[in-house]
Image (spheres, rainbow, N blue to C red):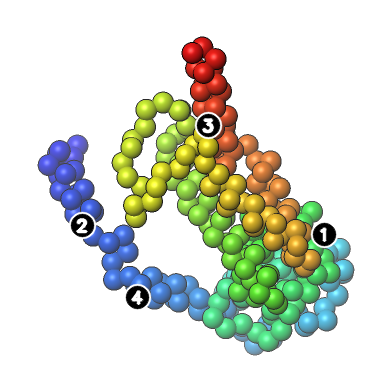
Amino acid sequence: MIAPDEVAKDRSVTATQATYPDAPESLITHWERRRARLTFAPGEALPPLDVDLAALAAARLPAEVPPLAKPASPHAQKRHALMQELAGQSELALLNALLIAHLRKRRYPRNTTRLFRRIWVEQGPFLMGELSTRWLISSMITFADHGETEAQRRLRQSLNILFSLMKLYEYERSYTGLEPSRPFRNGPRNIAPLPLGMPEFALATGGLDINLLAPIWKEAQEEPVIGPLACHLLAALNADPGNLFRRITQMRVKLRRRRAARATAD
């Protein structure tokens, strides 16, 4: 068992240190290390730009993936791992995932971006019906850096930030032990100041959640190429019963009903 004075010591150290020491250099160095190019072995390559996408959509990956022969190039290792994850899905799903993996690196083969865009222009509805939300989000985020227009890049970047912060928050929330669909209680709470001196959110009357989602959804409705995918993801988020926005809405409704009942009683 940790002694109380040791806990206090740990807290005092944490309070005086930066979350990421030596930032931003340490963050950038770590980020760049993860962006090393996926190199190929002789004879390996991505498909050409004019590959038959309809044929790839019709072809299925094997349900059982044999072990990877060693040694293997970084590209082959990534392809094998993706084949295991996407087993039984289409060859097009694999190609989409491979292109995303390459486009996240500092350097990638010529025409990778054009092929990725072509997939979503020609086969977007097919992939929206096949891919999991995890891969739909990954596809959307990839457009943050590789969209053809400023509107596309802005929309993708907004969704990148939205879903990335949601993932961090929902992961931390899981340590409360509560089910994701269960809203927090509306009773007494810790009223410590918010970070950076931000004003508190007004649960009953505030519209921060709507002000965040509405502009993104509006931009998605107006963007013809990848907008349908963005709308699909936002609609899925709206229908999901276990996320921050659903819990906030439930808490807001409960608080408004309580205040209305008090006003009626008075």
Q: Quadrant of the N terminus?
A: top left
Specify the amino acid type for callout 4.
Glu
Reading the image, the residue beneath label 1 is 126
Residue that appears at 64% across and 56% down: 215
Find out whether the residues at labels 4 and 1 contact each other: C-beta distance under 8 Å: no
Reading the image, the residue beneath label 2 is 16
Task: Sort mark 3 into few (<14), some (14-19) or many (20+) by Cα contacts within 10 Å.
Answer: some
Specify the amino acid type for callout 3.
Met
Task: Sort mark 2 into few (<14), some (14-19) or many (20+) by Cα contacts within 10 Å.
Answer: few
Find out whether the residues at labels 4 and 3 contact each other: C-beta distance under 8 Å: no
Closer to the N terminus: mark 4 or mark 3? 4
- Determine which of the numbered discs, if any, sits on residue 251 in the image: 3
Residue that appears at 68% across and 70% down: 152
Reading the image, the residue beneath label 4 is 25
- Residue 14 appearing in the image: yes
Q: Secondary structure at mark 2?
A: helix
Specify the amino acid type for callout 1.
Phe
Q: Nearer the viewer, residue 240 or 100?
A: 240
Closer to the N terminus: mark 1 or mark 2? 2
- Residue 83 appearing in the image: no
Of badges 4 and 3, the one in the foreground is 3
